[in-house]
Image (spheres, rainbow, N blue to C red):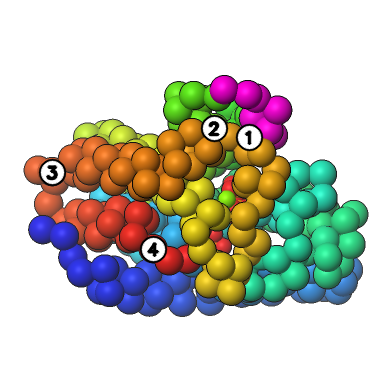
Amino acid sequence: MNRDIKDIKEQIMHRGAEVNKALRNFVDSFKGTMPASLLDAIWYPLNAGGKRLRPVLCLEAAQLAGGNIDKAMPAAIAIELVHTYSLVHDDLPCMDDDDLRRGQPTVHVKFGEAMAVLVGDALLTMAFESISASGIPDSAKSKVALELAQAAGPAGMIAGQVLDLEGESVHGGTLDDVIDIHLHKTAKLMMGAVRMGVLAAEGDDSLLKALTNWGRDAGLAFQIADDVLDETSTSAELGKSVGKDKEENKLTAVAVLGVEGARTHAAKMAEQAKAYLSGISGTGFFTGVTELFINRSS
Ligand code: IPE
Ligand code: IPE
Ligand code: MG
Ligand code: MG
Ligand code: MG
C-alpha cells in the first residue's frame, strides 16, 4: 500500500537532516588542508537546501537490504556530492547558463566561473574519497565505487548531459530521443543511488535487480516531472530558473508531448516503476517516493 505523501516527505526530511550532518562533518574534515576560499565555495552549494533525494534513496535501499544506515552513510554522501557537482556544472554559462539554484545565486555567479569548475571537480573527487575512506566492508567498497563511477561517468550522467546539449539543435526529436537523454542524465544517478545502498549493505541480487528497474523508471518519471515544472512552475517555488528549456530549445518531454502528454507519460513510468516492487515486503517508502516524484511542486 502507498504511504501518504506527507509521511514520505517527513521521512525524507528526517533522513535528509542526518545526511546534512554527515556532509558537514565530512567537509569539515578537510579544514586546514585546502584554501579557506575553496572550502567556502564547496560548502556553499551543499548547504543551499537540496532535497537530498538520492542520498535518502541510498540509505533506504541499504536498510531494505538488511544493512545499517550509518555504514551506508559514506555512500549516501558520495552520491549527493556527485549530484551537487553535476548541478554546479549544469548551471555554468557554457551549459544551461543559470543564475539561480537551490534558491541562491549559482556558484559561478557567487564565486566566478573558474572557481565553479573547480568546486565541481572537488566535489566529484571528494565523493570517491568518502567511499574509499569509509568503513564499508572491503568486499563491497570497490563495487560501490564502481557503481558511482559508472552512474556518473561518460556512459552515465555525462553521456546524458552531452545528449542534452546536442538535443538543443535537433529538429523533430522523438520521445525515444528524450527518454535516452533522461535515462542518462537523471535516471542513472537514481539507479546508482539505490544500487550503492544495496551493495554497501551486501544485499541480495533479486533486490538489486528490482531496485535497479525501479530506479530507471522512477528516474525517468522524475525528469519528466522536472520538464513539466520548468514549463508550469515559478522560480520562487523551484529555487531555480523556469522557462529555460523552451528558451534554449531543449529536447524535453514537454517539447515532444506537451504538458498534459508529459504528465500522462510520467504517471505511466511511475506505475511501471512501482510494479517492479510488488511482492517485495517493506517497499512502502519507495512506492510513496514514486508518487512524490510525479506529484511534487519543487
Ligand atoms: C535537479 O535534481 C536535477 C535534475 C535531475 C532534474 P533535484 O530536483 O533532486 O535537485 P535538488 O538536489 O533538490 O536541488
Ligand atoms: C540536469 O537536468 C540533470 C543533471 C545531470 C544536472 P536539467 O538541466 O533539466 O536540471 P535543472 O532543471 O537545471 O535542475
Ligand atoms: Mg541541463
Ligand atoms: Mg539545468
Ligand atoms: Mg530541468
- Mark nearer the N terminus (1 vs 3): 1
Name the amino acid, label 1. Answer: Asp
The residue to which callout 1 is attached is 164
For the residues labelled 4 and 2, say whether their Cβ atoms are less than 8 Å apart.
Answer: no
Q: Is residue 34 something that shows in the picture? A: no
The N terminus - image quarter: bottom left
Spatial CA span between label 2 and label 1: 6 Å
- Mark nearer the N terminus (1 vs 4): 1
Numbered circle sitting on residue 181: 2
Numbered circle sitting on residue 262: none
- Mark nearer the N terminus (4 vs 2): 2
Q: Is residue 258 above or below residue 9?
A: above
The range drawn in magenta is 164-172
- Mark nearer the N terminus (3 vs 4): 3
Residue name at image x 63 percent, y 64 percent: 240
Name the amino acid, label 2. Answer: Ile
Name the amino acid, label 4. Answer: Arg
Classify mark 2: helix, strand or loop: helix
Query: Residue 40 in the image: x percent, y percent?
Result: 79, 73
For the residues labelled 2 and 1, say whether their Cβ atoms are less than 8 Å apart.
Answer: yes
